[in-house]
Amino acid sequence: MNAIETRGLGKRYRRTWAVRDCDLTVPVGQVTALVGPNGAGKTTLLRILAGLATPTAGTATVLGAAPGSPQARAAVSAVDQTVPLYRHLRVAGQLAAARALNDQWDADLAARRLSALGIPTSARVGKLSGGQQAQLALTMALARRPQLLLLDEPLASLDPLARQDVLGWLMTCVAEDGLSVVFSSHVIAELERVASYLVVLSAGRIQVAATVDSLLDTHLALTGPADGVDDLYDQVEIVTAQRAGRQALVLARTGAAPPGWAPRPVTMEELVLGYLREPAARVVPEPGLEIVR
Amino acid sequence: MVTVKPDDDGLSPIMFYLDRGSGVPTYLQFVHQVDYALRLGFLREGDQLPRIKDVTRTLAVNPDTVMKAYRELELRGVTAGRPGVGTFITQAPDIAGLKQMAGLQKKLTGWLGEAAAAGVDELGMKALFTAALRNFNDGGGAARLPGRDDRDAHGGGAARGARRDGGAA
Amino acid sequence: MTTLTVLRMTRATWYKHRFSVVGVPAVFLLAALALFADSVVQRHWLSVHHLSGCLVANATTGGSWCRSAAWASLSSPSQTPNVIAVAVLALPVLAGLFAGVPWVAREFESGAFRFTWTQDTGPRHWLLGTFGPLVLLAAVSAAIYGAAAYWWYQVAQWQAGTSIWSWRWSSFELTPLSIAGWTVLTMALALLCGVLIRRVLPAMIAFIATLGACAYLSQTWLRPWLFGIGTAVKQVSWSASAGWPPSTTTYTVQTWLQTPSGQRVSGLPAVNNVSAWIAQHHYTSWVAYQPHNHLIWLELARNGILITAAAFAVLATVWWLRIRPAD
């Protein structure tokens, strides 16, 4: 079973398509990073997968079920960009409401986590800081014991230490419970160590959808003469090339460097930035890689 | 460089760290750190490596990455995994190897002295060494240095295969 | 939905909407209390002046006599009872406006639906499970309120100075069944407006507009149409038909003349002495009316229609949520 499967998924708001022609197949157990410029459609895609938006075209399934269906809702937790909470309630009331709304609820986990974070249950949710609200939302999402977690820029409001702590907790859930995670992120630097699957969205279309390992294996950073770039286009598949006087830096989709070019393993940061710079470049998912071992 | 104190039960003599700016893949950093610890005697035969869930919690890395590192070490014959228990060092570097290393280091120090005398600064030395190393590896015929990154051979599939062993590689 | 789910939903409702869940019944019951107290005062006045017989006497005979006696104590007939009657009917509207409409519209407007919609209970179950208890509570307390209003109007209507007539709109509407029916409809319409419009203020405006249209339709079309169904027909003398109805308990639907051969004639002959002319031409005078014992059935019918309309509104809401859950 795949955590996420979309075929030709599209969503239009009035005249503009927020997402279009999205074909995705993400296996379970992956930590998927959703990357792209603002307005690329990340939030829309996540909302469709969470069942909060109806697609205009195409289909989507999460863990084999239609988004928003009872099966999907039972297995999928989502924390929207707006960090939706009942802001007029106290934390205790919010937790009690959440418990009432869910069949599966780990009250112990929620209580332990909140006390470890120092969030008092008598505080009013609306009066908590942005970071604390995000922590609360995340805690409740995980107290539902989901199989798939959808996070839309959830860690933006957290300080560096809290961010590290939350990521650590998420990674432990992935390790111990086999949780699948999809999170949108602007912090490219942490992608390589946190994410195992990468999806790059650009202007509503999927540019890259592949495992991090396959991407790092199939790309190289090449250094060489600036005037050799034009010839290089015939030799390898170039994603993006930057020239500066005599030297050129090229991100190429290839296994070996052609003569005259010095190869270097590419970092995730370079790879993502390279693709973002060239919206026309695409990595089409290879069917063999996506299917589970 | 970021180090975060792990709060496991002190099962492992070492703790991993991340060098975020280095550009070296995370799993390789772990492999090198184990290697380094072995050579310096921090790790001995029979020692347990940090548990995957402890590493993921404290360093916030994907468990696949840790498993990939442990799988790599296992393939090199350095470690062996005991399902449900952990990953343990099986092979300590032999004394002869250590002696060889000492000799090589002495030669290297001599070379460094020559380079310094010729007016080459630290960056120049690094560039010379890196270029020579690359030429050496690309030269074909010549044996590859032990411990070279052979990502291409041991790709994601292998690491992912060990995924479901209850978290312990 | 299992009983357990319903109970959990009720608890979730409590946590989120306790203000409405307590407030709406409280307002109804307080208003009922006020009406009850006012009527007690009036009835006490009646008994002090030995007019209690008015209440038990047949409305036909007791009406004008009690009215005169009541006027004797009052300076003049006042419209206050009718004004209050309108105010009484306004209460369900306010309940729908301030408790019903924001229930869902606020959920959308504040973005909280993005939390509620992603929990195990889906949007539909949440809506029915949490809004349902409110409607139930509102309907029950509205029925009590309606009973108090009915009891109050029995005496208070004498102040208005007009003849007592159980078919008047205020008598018809100020009953437990009618007020409960209107309450259920206002809540259902509030729900529908909130779900369709998803912004509190515009939804409130739409709600008022829709409800106003329903009230207008009910008053000007629905009731007259209903009253025209199943009428009894009777031949009366012309002089009697002019003064029809003879009692305050029947409702005249139509009067007409018939030719000797039985053909219905519309309108009246343009002569000075209609009565003589009719006798001369052997025409008969007829009246179609609703006897008093039809009133309860017509009330049931009209309020049944209100509740059916409410059911349709709820179904429309549920259907709309299915095809367009959030965005």
Image (cartoon, rainbow, N blue to C red):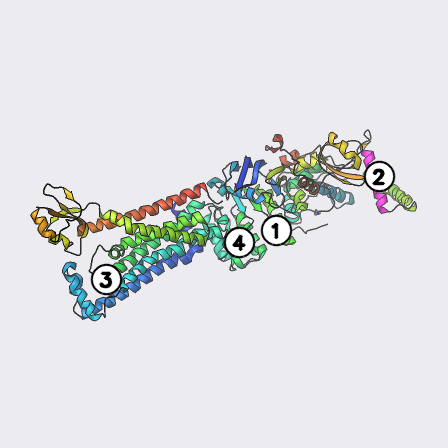
The subunit carrying tag 1 is A
Of marks 3 and 1, the one in the foreground? 3
- Tell me the quarter of the picture where residue A288 sits: top right
Marking on residue A111: 4
Q: What is the chief secondary structure element of the magenta stretch?
A: helix
Residue B16 counted in the magenta span? no
Residue type at mark 3: give it. Gln
Residue C157: numbered disc: 3
Per the rendering, the mark at residue B100 is 2
Compute the Cα span from label 3 to label 2.
115 Å
Task: Look at label 4 and name its amino acid.
Answer: Ala
Write down the region rendered in magenta.
B121-137
The residue lying at 16 percent from left, 63 percent from top is C64
Q: CA distance from mark 2 to mark 4?
A: 57 Å
Which chain does the residue under circle 4 lie in? A
Mark 2 vs mark 1, CA separation in Å:
51 Å
Measured from the top left, where is residue C235 in percent x and y?
A: 11, 48
Q: Nearer the viewer, mark 2 or mark 4?
A: 4
Q: Secondary structure at mark 4?
A: helix
Tally of numbered discs = 4
Residue B108 at what x, y percent from top left? 87, 42
Front label number (1 vs 4): 1
